Amino acid sequence: MEPVRKWFSFNKGERIAIITIMAAIVVLILACLFRPARKSLSESSLHNLDSLLALRQQAHEIQQQQQTEKGQEVAELHPFPFNPNTLTEEEWQKMGLTDRQIRNIMNYQAKGGKFYSKSDLGKLYTISEEEFAQLEPFIVLPEVSRSTKTNPYTKKAENQSAEEKSKPEKKPIPIVDLNTVDSTTLVELPQIGGYTAARIIAFREKLGGFIDKEQLRDVKGMDAERFATIQPYINIGATELRKLDVNRADFKTLVNHPYLNYEQVKRIVNQREKRGMIKDWTQLQSLIQDDGEVNPLLEHYVTY
């Protein structure tokens, strides 16, 4: 028993060390028991993910609502001859502009803004390019100087009545050749503004020249009423058409022609690369007729 008692007997210093260690262990156990509970990493991550998804859904709903509101503001236009400097809110509404567009125009004028040319109206961010293309032919603007200032020498002229003011003489409407006319002359035709004139010239370049007045109906924005108005003032002069060589022209050149679509051009290129050259109009017509309507006027624009 004596050896065993020797092993379990401690001096004063050892007893103090053992008590200190036991006290530290008890403190650590108590600290673990009373530590505030924390959410697991997975729970926190899931909560953050749910929040992000909710924010994304909310942003998507707001975007859809804004698009819907924007779409609701777009109204069909009913233009009539007008001077944008004198038009009232009611007259703008009658023309078909939205409340937002009218409010912006009125604010522009209230700050001293004035329309000196047709293009000035198109510069307003509230008027889209397509809307301006519809309105431009109906804009009527007298000659206005941008640098008009009040001075004693012009006071008399400013006080003249409308009847006393000289009015520019109306130019006679020219008769134009569709194959040679430029955009400057085209705008002198009734209901033809700058945008429409540019589209006619661009269509003529793609086409290779006009052979019939009716081809104007294929120009974007050329409705039946506008065509009927300008028809008396247009003719087709003798001119050499610019033709396409269907056996040698590249894909881009062919598909750019108004009377050929993408699938038809693919068939033409496959034919000449795999089976041989196209010989005549009958073969070409038979080749492309399954890929879209074949305009009979196309025959005048191709060569072999």
Image (cartoon, rainbow, N blue to C red):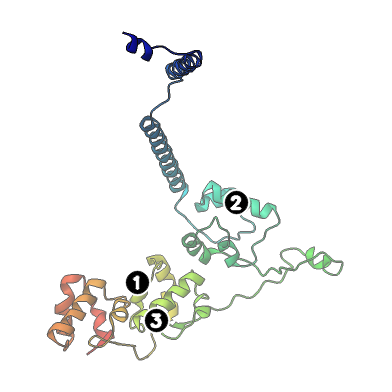
How many C-alpha atoms fall within 10 Å of the one at disc 1: few (<14), some, or many (≥20)?
few
User: Label 1 amino acid?
Assistant: Asp
Query: Where, by quadrant of the figure, is residue 179 drawn?
Result: bottom left
Q: Which mark is residue 104?
A: 2
Where residue 4 appears, as percent x and y from the top left, is: 33, 12
Q: Is residue 45 left or right of residue 150?
A: left
Residue 54 on image: x %, y %: 40, 36
Secondary element at tag 1? helix
**Element under label 2?**
helix
CA distance separating discs 3 and 2: 38 Å
Camera-side residue of 75 and 232: 75
Residues marked 1 and 2 touching at CB (< 8 Å) = no
Above or below 63: residue 42: above
Identified at 48% across, 70% down, the residue is 195
> Residue extending furthest left?
275
Residue type at mark 2 is Asn
Q: Using the image, tell me which numbered label, if any, was put on residue 37.
A: none
User: Residue 35: x, y in percent?
Assistant: 46, 20
Residue mark closest to the camera, 1 vs 3: 3
Q: Badge 3, how many Cα within 10 Å: few under 14, some, many 20+?
A: some
Mark 3 lies on residue: 205
Give the Cα distance between marks 1 and 2. Answer: 35 Å
Q: In this view, does 285 lie above or below 127?
A: below
Q: Which of 57 and 80 is in front in this view?
A: 57
**Which element is circle 3 on?**
helix
148 left or right of 59 in image: right
Query: Between 298 and 23, which is closer to the camera in this rendering?
Result: 23
The one nearer the camera, 263 or 23, is 23
